[in-house]
Amino acid sequence: MYKIPESVLVVVHTRALQVLLIRRADAAEAFWQSVTGSKDHPHESFEAAAVREVREETGIDARAPGAVLRDWQLENVYAIYPQWRHRYAPGVYLNTERVFALEVPHAVPVTLNPREHTAYTWLDWRAAADRCFSPSNAEAILWLPRFARP
């Protein structure tokens, strides 16, 4: 079954703008990123995908008391990296990524899925943006001070 070329990017952060980054397990280099993932089925909402992906990749409950999930109503369209293109249907080269932020009360413990990620860290938002391999992820983190607080 092919991946759906619609995904979420969820910047998990504290009120003090400490950002959670996780390191991909399937990359030869140290690819650090925020929570990302594709929809499970075409009718899954972006919000439902965001909640699911956060839980699957970090063990964090986006619906827990004190957690605030914000849909930034922004979408990035980008070329799928060649090393991951085989996961999509033939002829699919672009992905649409919806951007969310999840504010948690503090740097909460993280439980990684070792098939997907090998390490995590909490960093100041500027340092987190510098460490991301994905330009759209780094850009979202740099927007965090403007979007994080209502």
Image (cartoon, rainbow, N blue to C red):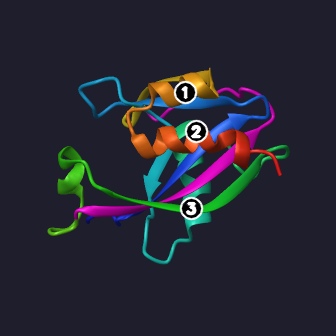
Image quadrant where residue 107 sits: top right
Q: Does the magenta stretch include residue 49?
A: no
Q: Is residue 60 visible?
A: no
Q: Where is residue 48 in the image (x, y as percent from the top left)?
A: 60, 64
Depth check: 69 or 44 in front? 69
Q: Which of marks 2 and 1 is nearer the N terminus?
A: 1
Q: Under tag 2, what secondary structure?
A: helix
Magenta-highlighted residues: 93-113
* Residue contact at pointers 2 and 1, CB within 8 angstroms: yes
Kind of residue sitting beneath label 3: Leu
Residue at position x 61%, y 22% from top?
123
Q: Residue at x 28, y 34 (%)?
A: 26
Image location (x, y in percent) of residue 4: 35, 66
Distance in Å between CA atoms under marks 2 and 3: 13 Å
Q: Residue 74 carries which label?
A: 3
Give the crowd class for mark 3: few <14, some 14-19, many >=20 residues within 10 Å. Answer: few
Among numbered discs 3 and 1, the one appearing first in the sequence: 3
Give above or below for 112 relative to 55: above
Q: Distance between the residues labelled 3 and 1?
A: 20 Å
